[in-house]
Amino acid sequence: MIHEIAILEIKPGTEDDFELAFAKAGPIFQRAKGCRSMEIQRCIEHPSRYTLVVGWDTVEDHMVGFRESADFLAWRELAGPYFASPPQVTHTRLAARNF
């Protein structure tokens, strides 16, 4: 499994609405091929910054299967209005775990 990590800068004052939109997006990701998990973490020091973490079977499931689908457009329609800037996206794989 790989993780899509996206830093999302949200327009100040719209954080609650963004979180509601994120909750509505759950079914979009649940039906995506290869999607195993999805969550956002809100930054304590910068409350308008979120980290989106999505578990995918492969990078291709995210970059081709999802990003080239109508569901991606639906996700952007829900969340996009709250973005203060384009998300910064990377993919990671587990290198080591201590416990």
Image (tube, rainbow, N blue to C red):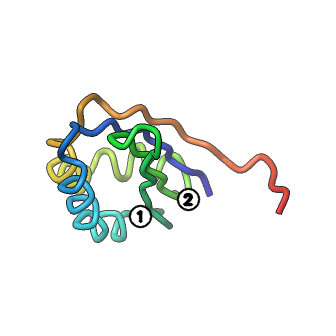
Residue ID at (26%, 63%): 25
Circle nearer the N terminus (2, 1): 1
Furthest residue toward front: 45
Task: Quarter of the image for the N terminus: give it.
Answer: bottom right
Task: Quarter of the image for the C terminus: give it.
Answer: bottom right
Circle 2 residue: 57
Q: Is residue 48 above or below residue 54?
A: above
In the rendered image, residue 35, in percent from the top left (x then y), is placed at 45, 63
Q: Tell me which corner region of the image, top left, top right, bottom left or bottom right, holds residue 68.
A: top left
Nearest the camera: 59 or 75?
75
Circle 1 residue: 33
In the rendered image, residue 54, in percent from the top left (x then y), is placed at 47, 55
Nearest the camera: 89 or 60?
89
Q: Are marks 2 and 1 in contact (CB under 8 Å)?
A: yes
Q: Tell me which corner region of the image, top left, top right, bottom left or bottom right, holds residue 26.
A: bottom left
Q: Amino acid at mark 1?
A: Lys
In the rendered image, residue 65, in percent from the top left (x then y), is placed at 38, 52
Residue ID at (41%, 64%): 33
The secondary element bearing badge 2 is classed as: loop
Spatial CA distance of label 2 from label 1 is 8 Å
Badge 1: how crowded within 10 Å, few (<14), some, or many (20+)? some
Q: Is residue 64 above or below residue 84?
A: below
Q: Amino acid at mark 2?
A: Asp
